Image (tube, rainbow, N blue to C red):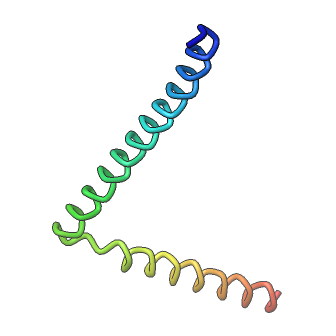
Amino acid sequence: MPITDIFIVSVIVSAFVVFAIALAWGDYQTRDIARASRQRAAAGANVVALKRAVSTEASERGVREKAEASAA
């Protein structure tokens, strides 16, 4: 096998290895996030309720601002 073919094959294989390492690292990172989310859920933190409370407050503020703008 010529040296150029060996070089080309090694470059292609190394590209796949780098891609596999990047995928494994991303998978590890997302599993860590999912683990932390499960721990927060087990501790009783209700993230959905907090989001709803914030969105309700923001919508009430928007209604209030529209009412003040129309009254002025």
Residue at 57% over, 28% down: 12
Q: In which quadrant is the N terminus drawn?
A: top right
- Measured from the top left, where is residue 50 in percent x and y? 39, 74
Viewer-nearest residue: 68 or 42: 42
Residue at 52% over, 80% down: 57
Task: Determine the residue located farthest toward the front in the rendered image.
Answer: 1
Q: In which quarter of the image is residue 40?
A: bottom left
- Measured from the top left, where is residue 58 in percent x and y? 57, 78
- Measured from the top left, where is residue 55 in percent x and y? 52, 79
Residue at 83% over, 86% down: 72
Q: Is residue 67 above or below residue 2?
A: below
Q: Quadrant of residue 49?
A: bottom left
Viewer-nearest residue: 23 or 56: 23
- Measured from the top left, where is residue 15 in percent x and y? 54, 29
Q: In this view, does 67 lie above or below 8?
A: below
Q: Is residue 36 left or right of residue 4?
A: left
* Callout count: 0
Q: In this view, does 41 lie above or below 20?
A: below
Task: Determine the residue located farthest toward the left in the rendered image.
Answer: 43
Task: Determine the residue located farthest toward the top in the rendered image.
Answer: 3
Viewer-nearest residue: 71 or 26: 26
Q: Is residue 61 above or below residue 1?
A: below
Q: In this view, does 39 lie to the left or right of 72?
A: left
Residue at 81% over, 90% down: 70
